[in-house]
Amino acid sequence: MHLDHVTLRTSTLVATRDFFLLVCPDLKKGPRPAAIRHIPGQWLYADQAPILHLIAALPTFMPLRGDVWDHVAFRLQNEADFCDRLDGLRIPWKRMDLPELQERRIFLQAPGGAPVEVVFRHHSRDTGADPHASASATSPTQPSYGSSA
């Protein structure tokens, strides 16, 4: 298991982005996948990895009071085993495919409601129905973390 990225929801997207770029000179602005570009935000990269995801918190989109760390993402192997385990434990989850990154992301919540994302790289390019998709899953392009990838 590896830490993949952290996401910060902020009401000051540009200032927050500029702050991290100033404080952490190894971070660079980078592209975001097409599937999530409808969410105002910015990804900051270290080397070739997008490790800090910034999401704008707007009055009409994910409002909040002050900035919050939105979620943590882990990178794992064996997606099918992981999803089977969640199903066996009756833990609801949903997926998001990011084909341009060759990634599949699984979203779930810890018991207290904290959002958790698990990233699987180099998944199958199959775009058909996922036999492991949880019955309670919502749209794969609109995960519910923070109640909203």
Image: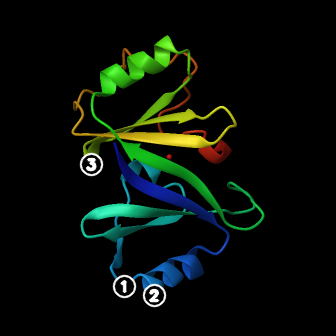
Asked whether, in this view, residue 101 is left or right of residue 15, the answer is left
Place of residue 105 in the rendered image (x, y in percent of width and height, measured from the top left):
40, 38
Q: Does residue 5 sit above or below 85 in this rendering?
A: below
Q: Amino acid at mark 2?
A: Leu
The number of callouts visible is 3
Residue 81 picture quarter: top left
Q: Does residue 124 sit above or below 147 in this rendering?
A: above
Q: Amino acid at mark 3?
A: Glu
- The one nearer the camera, 4 or 98, is 4
Kindly check if marks 2 and 1 are in contact, taking CB atoms under 8 A apart as contact.
yes
Q: Residues within 10 Å of mark 1 (few under 14, many from 20)?
A: few
- Asked whether residue 42 appears in the rendered view, the answer is yes
Residue at the spot 46% in from the left edge and 51% down from the top edge: 36
List the single residue furthest toward the bottom.
22
Disc assigned to residue 22: 2
Asked whether, in this view, residue 144 is left or right of residue 24, the answer is right
